[in-house]
Image: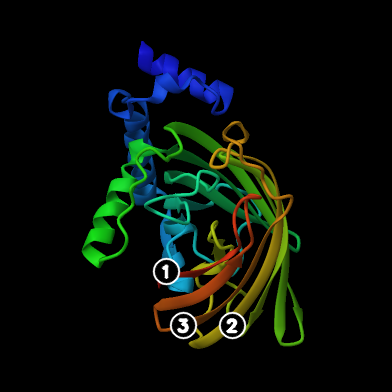
Amino acid sequence: MPELRALKVRLSTKGRCPRHLWRHPRDFQGPKIVVTIALAVVLAGAATAGERLGTSFATTNDSLGEQLDRWQSTSLQVDILTGPEWTGRAPEAFGQVLNYRFRTDILTPEDLREPDPNDRRHAGVLAFGLHTYASRGAFDLRLGGDLFVIGPQTKLLEVQRDLHKILGFSIPTLDDFQIGNRVEVQGSGEAGRAFDAGPVRVRPFIEAQAGPEDLLRAGVDLSFGSIGSDDLLVRLPSTGHLVPAIRGSDGRGASFVLGADAAWVEDSVYLPEHLGYNLTSVRTRLRAGVHYEFDRVNVFYGFSWLGREFESQREGQFVGALQVGLRF
C-alpha cells in the first residue's frame, strides 16, 4: 500500500524520503489513524490507571514574553498524573506514577508573510506521550516516550491563521514554507538531585532525548519558598520551566523560581541540514517565574530567554509561560 510504504520510508530515513511522497498530505491517512489510536490509548489510560493525583494545564507564547510572534511561537501542554497515594516523593519503581501528556507546538519564521529564505520554516506539532517517575536514593528520575505528528497534516497553520484573524494579528501566508509531513517517536529521560542551601532549594539536572531533536542538556533550577520540597514537578519542553503537577503540601502563598540550562543538539527535524540550516553549537535558556498556591489550585507565570537555535537566526527571544495546576 502506498500509505504504508511512505510511512516506512519516512521513519527509516529520518526525514530524507523523496518529497513527492509527502506532497499531498490529504491523500495520506496513516498519521491520522496513528493519532486516533494514540489519543484513545492516552485517554483510556488516564481514565483507568490508578488514582488521579494532579492535572496541569500550561501554555507558552512569544506574545506573553515580548509581544511578538516568531520562532518558538506558542505551545500548549496538558499533563494528567495518576498513581498510588502521593507521599511526597515518587516510588522507587518506574511505572507506578504515570503522566499522560498531550502537547502542541507551533514554530514559525520571524516574518509570517514574507519570511527570509534562511529563516526557520513553519512547523505544526502534535505530541502524545506517556512518562513515568521514580526516586532512587537522592535522585529524582523521569523516563518517557512521545509520538510526534509534524507538518501540514496537523492543520495547525490553519488554526493559527484563524486565531490571528479573530485577534487582528498578522495573517500567516506560509503554505509553501513549511516542514513536510512526518511521524516521529521520541524517547527521553531526566535525572535531578535537589538539596537545600540555606533558604534556596537547588536542583541540578541532566536530560537526554532522541527523536525529532537529538540532544543532551544540563542545567540547574533554584526555588525560594515551599514549592518543590514534596511536590512532583513537570518540565515545559520549550522554556524549561518546572511547574507543579502534584502538590504534596497544603501551604498557601508565593514561591519564586530561577533556572538556566545549556543543550548540545545533534540533529533537528525542524532545522534539517539538507535545507541548509546550521545548528548553533550550544542552545541556552534562562528563566524566572513566580508560583502562587491556593487551596486546591496553583498558578504560575514566568518568562524565559531562549538563545539562538540556528546560525541564521538573528537573535534570541523572550517567551512567556502560564500554568494552572489542580490538586485532587
Q: Is 78 situated left or right of 263 in this image?
A: left
Q: Is 94 situated left or right of 245 in this image?
A: right
Residue type highlighted by circle 3:
Glu
Residue bearing mark 2? 256
Nearer to us in this view, 14 or 53: 14
What mark, if any, has residue 63 been given in the picture? 1
Tell me the CA gap for discs 3 and 1.
Answer: 25 Å
Element marked by disc 2: strand
Nearer to us in this view, 289 or 242: 289
Nearer to us in this view, 88 or 233: 233
Residue type highlighted by circle 2:
Phe
What residue is rendered at 57% in x and 69% in y?
Answer: 304
Q: Are marks 3 and 2 in contact (CB under 8 Å)?
A: no
Element marked by disc 3: strand
Residue bearing mark 3? 293
Closest to the camera, between mark 1 and mark 2, is: 1
* Residue that extends furthest to the top in the rendered view of this protein: 1
Q: Position of residue 198 (x, y in %)?
A: 76, 87
Q: Who comes first in sequence, dot 1 or dot 2?
A: 1
Q: Quadrant of residue 111?
A: bottom left
10 Å crowding of disc 1: few (<14), some (14-19), many (20+): some
Q: Position of residue 101 (x, y in %)?
A: 44, 51
The N terminus appears in which quarter of the rendering? top left
Q: Quadrant of residue 212?
A: top right
